[in-house]
Image (tube, rainbow, N blue to C red):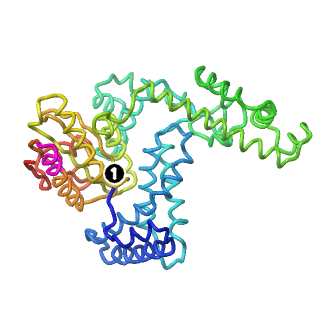
Amino acid sequence: MIKTSSRENDVRASRGDTRTRDEQVALWLDEYTRLRSSSSGTRPSRAADDLKARIAEHYTGLVESIARRFTGSGEPLEDMVQEGFLGLLSALENYDPCKRVKFSTYATHFIAGAMRHCLRDRGKIIKEPAWLHEVSSKVMRATDTLTLSLGRPPAPAEVAATLNLTEEAVEEILATRAVFQVASFEADPEEGATGLVDPEKIKSDKYVTGKLPIEDRIVLEGAVDKLKALEQKVLYEFFYKDLNQTEIAKKFDISCNYVSHILKNSTKKLRRVLGEAEVRDRGRQGSIVDSTTGLYTSAHVQGRLEEEVSRASRGGYSFALIVIDLWELPTDGRRREAVMAACGAAVRDSLRRVDIAGRFSAKGSDESFLILLPHTGAQATIVAERLEGVLAQVAAKEGESFLAHIGLALFPEQGRTTRVLLDIARGKTEAPLTMAVAV
């Protein structure tokens, strides 16, 4: 995470001088807006980048608090935080202090919106089998990439050729996706279901319980059994028999306020229980964090790269990709892992919370790291230079020497597909923004 350079402000913040800190952030926002306007259409200045980093760090607590609202979504909290920072950066690019709207209020809608957009992209009300979800995701990412490169939606045969699948398999996967979607209330049952509905608006078992996989129904029933008897009855009348709160209050001779209280607290308990079950499932399936470096695993960070390409293509924004290839690392296993752990910690501490870094499996190097810098253009060279310095510090501290190649690729200026971006960053094609260093 980038630290603010003002020692005085840090001391005041540590003493709890909220008024001074808020005034300082307001000054940062005014200054950043001025710099943003003056550099319209050109590369942002380093001063603007520094201000953006300071503002983003100041609102870390806001992003994390909003991300915790989505803990029951099944997505890792870290991913929600990163999506929230993307929303925060979008708010910063659109904020106008002259409108006299408090930035935290303005940014909250962007942050929560980015998280919901992520869940709409990734999530489903009904779970697919893991293998089908993985293949289906690959098909959709390949479809987005081909649409971008061809300028039109690809045919199933073209998607099949890209993924080395049969055309029949691709067609079956596309058809199967509709099976795992819930019908909209406005949809005509005779026309089939193609859209998703808000899960909080679902109050009928024909839309939920009857279509849940057996393992999910078992988890849900187990969670309901942990509720009090009255809570179970109120939930049943509200969600399964479609009674409103007034009707439920009359049926059980209690007040409407008490019914509302029961619904709020019992659903909160269910979310917590189901969230804990989801965490246990994820733990059994394996962590997305590399145990040595503390960064994301290679599979996860590559998946995030493909998602970022798709998202940036739709949103029309840029991002930067950095690949660090390491050679001549210690051959002794323990020393090698110790150096990799130190490198991983140094890389993590040199990046913003919004950035994504992982250990990367790449041919032709001893070890590699893959780093995504969302909403970042050519100024990513500053990050590459900083990484060069921190790797040199790691080598000195560990008493080891190794070679490092730090390569940078920019979307969409230098490439629009993951393969092209990775080739540029690793120096397989002409890449003006790369550096090879000995540390």
Check if residue 393 falls in the magenta segment: yes
Residue drawn at 39 percent across, 26 percent down = 170
Q: In this view, does 379 lie above or below 295?
A: below
Quick one: quadrant of the N terminus? bottom left
Query: Which amino acid does the dot numbered 1 rest on?
Result: Asp
Which residue is situated farthest in the front direction here? 15
Give percent across and percent down for residue 186. Answer: 67, 42
In this rendered view, identify the residue nearer to me: 154 or 417.
417
Residue at 42% x, 61% y is 90
**Furthest residue in direction top, as rendered:** 214
Circle 1 SS class: loop
Please determine whether, in this image, residue 260 is positioned above or below residue 193: below
Q: Residue 314, image x and y in percent?
A: 39, 51
Which residue is depicted at the point 43% across and 63% down?
Answer: 58
Task: Tell me residue 177's x, y (percent).
Answer: 49, 30
In the displayed structure image, the side of residue 72 where residue 404 appears, left or right? left
In the image shown, does 290 or 235 lie closer to the viewer? Answer: 290
Q: Name the residue under label 1.
A: 355
Magenta span contains residue 224: no
347 relative to 171 in the view: left or right: left
Query: Residue 379 at what x, y percent from top left?
Result: 24, 62
- From the viewer's perspective, tell me whether residue 348 is left or right of residue 233: left
Q: Mark 1: few, some, or many residues within 10 Å (few <14, many ≥20)? A: many
Dividing the picture into quarters, in which one does residue 180 lie?
top right
Magenta residues, start to end = 391-399
User: Who is closer to the viewer here, 154 or 415?
Assistant: 415
